[in-house]
Image: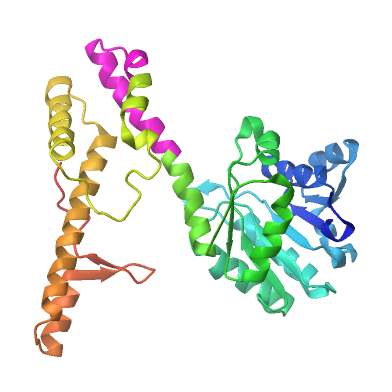
Amino acid sequence: MRGKKDIKKIAVIGSGIVGQATGKGMADVGNEVVFFDTNPVIIESLIKEGFYAKHADDLNDGSSNGFDFFMLSVPTPTQNGRINLHFLELALNNLGKAIRNGLKKTIVVLRSTVSPGTTENLLVPVLEKVSGKKAGKDFGVCMNPEFLREVSAKEDFRNPWMVVIGSNDKKAGAELEKLYAPFKSQIAHMSLREAEMMKYAHNLLNATKISFFNEMRIVGNSIGADPDKMFPIVVKSAEAIWNPKYGIKNFGAYGGVCLPKDTVAFFTWASEFLGYKMPVLKGTIQTNELMKAMAEYSDYMEKNETKKVSHEKQTIHHENLVRKNDFGHRIPHGAFSGLPL
């Protein structure tokens, strides 16, 4: 049974599918929840259901002083192929003012899906600037990605198969874990950036699996091989499906006897016999070639580090072979061009 000190006051900012599932789930276990949104229809609907709901502009009406958690679940849509953080920025500016006027240390929990680095490079700086307070000292920050299915969001939140808590502040992460204790779920702790990317890996794996089987279905239907007979067997025979550890270790490119030859042979057969250049399979082969190129480059650099090379020559060689991405990791120069297929 939860004691009074375990009951937290939670502000849910953004009351769409994710926000409502989150807030209602937290209310079910005894927490005090207030929903905030900009849509009057959503606000009215929540009030009719018996919940406290306010317009987002009312976040600074003085009542925000008592919140233990601010849970952000605002939309982050894709626009022209890029993530649009406009709604998040608006919410952060509003939230920053609430934190500035707040009388107690609170924890900001981001539930929205965002590109890796967004929490550190956008959320924290905006909140610190607007509030005049310091993350980690005056308020906590966590990334808490959601894995809710649209058609069963409420049930999924109440019965989570996994809770991920990203934080660079152990105290904030520990407090958020306590908040989820009534749900008795497995909890994984990681950094903010890892939690952000983990959500994308989660979604992209689901999308890739669907695309893979759709691609194989196209081939199967083209040759009279019934996918609905084959696929239920494939998911039982293929270790990539039934072994959760398969392929996730840093062992580099796939190798062995079967995988390298069969991927290329099947791609060539489908291209020549069916006229279908399988895009998912093509990407798989290209990625494997990239991994091999990166391994070769790494070996080359390790060997050359043991040699006495002048600083000038080493710098020239280094600039010719590598380029840096935004996160400082080195990738072989030209690695994404000239791949087979």
Left/right placement of residue 1 relative to residue 114 reads right
Which quarter of the figure has residue 322? bottom left
Which quarter of the figure has residue 324? bottom left
Viewer-nearest residue: 92 or 200: 200
Left/right placement of residue 155 relative to residue 244 reads right
Q: Is residue 181 in the magenta section?
A: no
Residue at figure coordinates x 32%, y 21% from the top left: 217
Q: In this figure, which colouring scheme has been used for the structure?
A: rainbow
- Looking at the picture, how far across and down is residue 246, in whole percent? 34, 43
The part of the chain drawn in magenta is 206-230
Residue 81 seen in the current view: no
- Looking at the picture, how far across and down is residue 32, in whole percent? 86, 52
Left/right placement of residue 339 relative to residue 9 reads left
Residue 59 seen in the current view: yes
Viewer-nearest residue: 281 or 81: 281
| Quarter of the image with the C terminus in it | top left
